[in-house]
Amino acid sequence: MNNLTLVGFETRILLERFGFPPSDLYSLPLSQKRFEEGGQYGIEISSVNNPKILKSVLALADASEIIIDRVDECRGIFRLLNNEIKEMVQICHERQIGLIMSVGPRAIYDTSAFAQSKNGSRMGYRLRGMENIIRATEDVKRAVDFGVRGFLVYDEGLLMFLNSLKNEGVIPRTTLLKLSVHAGCANPLSARLFEKSGADTINPIPDLDLPMLSAMRQAVNCPLDIFTDTAQEAGGFIRTYEVPDFIRIAAPVYLKCGPISQPLQNHLPTPEELGERMKQTARVLETIATYYPEAIRVSRKERTLGLPDI
C-alpha cells in the first residue's frame, strides 16, 4: 500500500498495525484456512423447524443424493416440545448431521412495542433486560440436557455469557455458538469482535460482495456461514455462480442453501418449498462440481458441525 492519494491513508496504516486488512480485498487472495479437521466447505439447510420438516428434508436429500452437513432450527427452542427436541437430536445423531437450534427469546417475540416499530426493527433480535437474558440461557440449558450441542445466538451479550458458561463447564465445552445473520455482522472488525466474544461460526449479512468477504476472512479464523440465496423478505437474490469463489476466498465456509424457495424467513416451509429448497441445493453442488471440483467437504469429525451428543 503506497498510494498516498487513497482516502484515509493513515487510517489504513493503523488498521494494518492492529491486524486488519487496509481495505476490501479486490485481489481476492485464496484462503489458506481450513476447518479444524480439514476441508473447505459444508452444506447447511435452514428453517428445519420441527421433526416433520427434518424428516422431509432428509428424504428429499436422499432421493437426490445430496449430503447435508448441518441443519438449523430457526423459530426457537421454546416453541418445541421436549419430545420434538429429543426426536430431532436422535435423527441427527443417527445420521451424523449437525443440529443447530435457535435461542427462543428474542425481540420479535417480546412485548416490546419499540421492536415492532419501523425504527425499533433495527435492534434485530436482541434481548431486552436481564430477565430475557436469563430466559434465553434457560432455553439453551433445556436443549443441552436433551443432547443439543449447537446454538444459534442473536444477541452479542448472550453470546459472551454463554461462552463464559462454556469455558467454566457449566454447559459442555463442546457446545457450538453460531452467530446469526440477524446480529448484523458486516465488516472485519465486527467479525473479530464476535469471534473474541465466543462465536464459533459467524453468519455475515447476506449481501457482502467478494472483496468484503475476502477481507473478513483475513480478520477471523472461524468458519463463515454464507447464504447462496435468500428468502424474498431478505432480498430474494441468488448467488449460485459466486459459490465456487465463496469457497476459494472465504474457506472454511458453510453454504446456506435454498431459502429462495420461500417468501418468509423462519416459517414452516411447505412440501413444495422444501422440494424447491433441495433443487436449489443440488444446483449449488452442481456448480461446485463444475467450477471447483477439487474443493474439499467438511469432515464428520469437525467440531463446528454441532453434532448432537446422546
Image: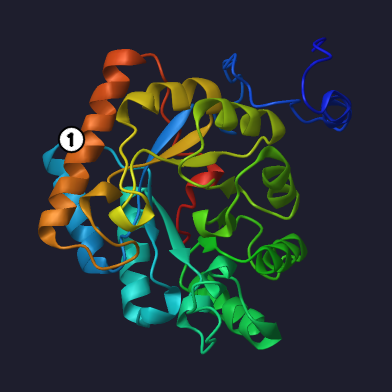
Q: Quadrant of the C terminus?
A: bottom left
* Circle count: 1
Q: Is residue 26 or residue 291 the one in the foreground? A: 26
Task: Please give the residue where the numbered disc 1 appears in the rendered image.
Answer: 65
| Amino acid at the residue labelled 1 | Glu
Residue 2 lies, in percent from the top left, at 82, 9
Q: Quadrant of the N terminus?
A: top right
Q: What residue do we see at 48% from left, 60% from top? A: 309
Q: Is residue 138 above or below residue 192?
A: below
Q: Is residue 95 above or below residue 103?
A: above
The image quadrant that residue 219 belongs to is: top right
Q: What residue do we see at 57% from left, 76% from top? A: 141
Residue 120 lies, in percent from the top left, at 56, 74
Q: Tell me the SS state at disc 1.
A: loop
Q: Is residue 96 above or below residue 142?
A: above
Q: Is residue 129 or residue 139 the one in the foreground? A: 129
